[in-house]
Amino acid sequence: MRSGAKVAVIGGVFAVVVGGVGYGAYNVLDGLGDSGVGGGSDAKTTSQEVRTGPVTKDEIAQTSKNFLAAWAKGDAEVASKLTNNAADAASVLTQYSESAHVTKAVITPGAATGSKVPYTVRATVSYKGKTKTWSYDSDLTVVRGLTTGHALVDWKPSVIHPELREGETLETGESSTASIEAVDRNGQVLSKEKYPSLGGILDELRKKYGEKAGGTTGIETWINSANADGVDKTLLTLVKGKPGRVTTTLDARIQAAAEAAVKKFDKSSVAAVEPSSGAIRAIANNPANGFEPARSAAVAPGSTMKIITAAMIIQHGLGSANSPVKCPSTVPWEGVTFHNLDEFSMPAPTLKTAFARSCNTAFIKPVLPLGDKRDTALHDEAGQYFGIGQVWRTGIATVDGKVPASEGSETAASFIGQGKIQMNPLNMASVTATAVHGQFLQPYIVPKSLDNRTFATANPLPGGVSAQLKEMLRYTATAPEGTATQAMASVGGDKGAKTGSSEIDGHATSDSWFTGYSNDLAAAALVQSGGHGGDAAGPVVAAVLLAGP
């Protein structure tokens, strides 16, 4: 059966209606010169010559024009042959008409930037008599074919839709999961249009709880996840199902502040929890679509880890908030020398002032007397008192923090949040919440009564430890020498914070970390390749805390 044909059942007999899919004109065919994509003649070569080198402006214009025109006409065969992976491209392009039921497409390109051509797609989706317009932006890149030397579209599924990934498929039909109306703790409706960072979370809540909440299915266009247990992404709703109401712990006002805050920095994410309950009040990422570091990252948290290290030092009798410590510029540990930022030292600090200045050596040197216990002490502290390393059942998929036992120089590195320590903003917001509340309460986004899941638990911090940690956090956010003071200047009430930076392989600069609290809200942010904690992640956390109680 040819691509684009429809099959109708008439009296039990299959009849093929040829040409059932009619695509609209490719509206860039007029005025190519004004679009910035065209305006040149075809490059000419002999039949034996294989061109090399970068693609030319003319080649970019002609190849993108021909590909987009063929796609808009619904000609998957022609369009796919203009890519560097014809087989995969043909499959996805065919899905566009046969599975996604697109019956018309008008594609308008923008100005090319180098070999990249952006464009807007305005498609019409029709299914069982229901029709709706579907608009979105995407882009393609023109490259030179490795064997032919021809200019070709560098094939990726995202050429067809920016959220489509390898192994995923587009489909239109009756939705596989019931609709939901997710609301915040005050009953305000949460939508991915108003809160883009919640797109993946809302899809996940729908899959898990839509039917339990009494919702019914509608007609939609969606992306089928490549994983059997993955979450499908709804792209367009033709007919709404009856939504079941799902109440979350999110706070729309705090979520809005988080969404705005992360937009100030690339690759930034933030999470906020309520220390007195563990309820997740906000979770946001920039970019909003795709991977969500706020709940899924697993990277070194840098000096924000000193909250747990400080608790370990206090509980093992190695120091207290106001006891003297040593802060030399460097400290050796089993053949490796650890440094402070810019090799600074402090003449006569306390643990509190060393915490406020983020002195690395002051959080390594005191642990030496622990002997054989020092390789497991941080792991035990994190798991037994902060709930790190346990399985969190928050109501959505989250990555649990890891503080593994270590040995050699990695033990010292772990005390300052490097080595094999892995955290994300949700983990670190919980660490801060535990420190100020004195008891770990597992973060959650929907109540456990919704599905009778079991929450992770931990021991309360021993008497006096929480009070000392709060004192250290407050000092870091208010003292003149505190590394968090500038970022937290606009935040009122009872407040505290800790900065951090961590070196990550592959990142141009260190990651920026910041965690803090104000009244009954704790938040943590990560800005990847963002420098030092107070510079980038600090303002993100401060903006979220300002929206809190």
Image: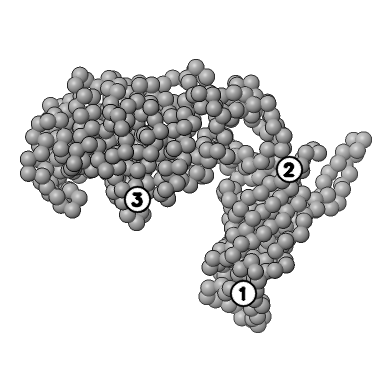
- The residue wearing badge 3 is 530
Number of numbered discs visible in the structure rendering: 3
Counting residues from the start of the chain, the first of labels 1 and 3 encountered is 1
> Of callouts 2 and 3, which one flags the residue occurring earlier in the amino acid sequence?
2
- 268 or 311: nearer the eye? 268
Q: Report x, y in % for residue 535.
A: 31, 48
Q: Marks 2 and 3: CB-CB under 8 Å?
A: no
Q: Residue at 67% across / 54% down in the picture?
A: 121
Residue drawn where x is 27% and y is 22% of the image: 438
CA–CA distance in space, label 2 to label 1 = 36 Å
Please report the residue visible at 72 percent of the width from the left and 34 percent of the height from the top: 239
For the residues bearing labels 1 and 3, Cβ distance under 8 angstroms: no
The spot of residue 477 in percent (x, y) is 24, 37
Q: Residues within 10 Å of mark 2 (few under 14, many from 20)?
A: some
Whether residue 63 is visible to the viewer of this picture, yes or no, is: no
The label nearer to you, 2 versus 1, is 2
Picture residue at 28% right of the left edge, 39% below the top? 489
Quarter containing the C terminus: top left
Above or below for 261 versus 187: below
Front disc: 1 or 3: 3
User: Residue 258 appears in which quarter of the rendering?
Assistant: top left
In whole angstroms, how far apart are the C-alphas of marks 1 and 3? Answer: 38 Å
Q: Secondary structure at mark 2?
A: strand
Amino acid bearing label 3: Gly
Left or right of 392 in this view: 519: left
Q: Amino acid at mark 1?
A: Asp
Q: Which residue is mark 1?
A: 58
- The Cα–Cα distance between marks 2 and 3, rounded to whole angstroms, is 42 Å
In the picture, the disc for residue 132 is 2
Residue 308 picture location, percent across and down: 25, 32
- Residue nearer the viewer, 457 or 123: 123
Whether residues under marks 2 and 1 lie with C-beta atoms below 8 angstroms apart, the answer is no
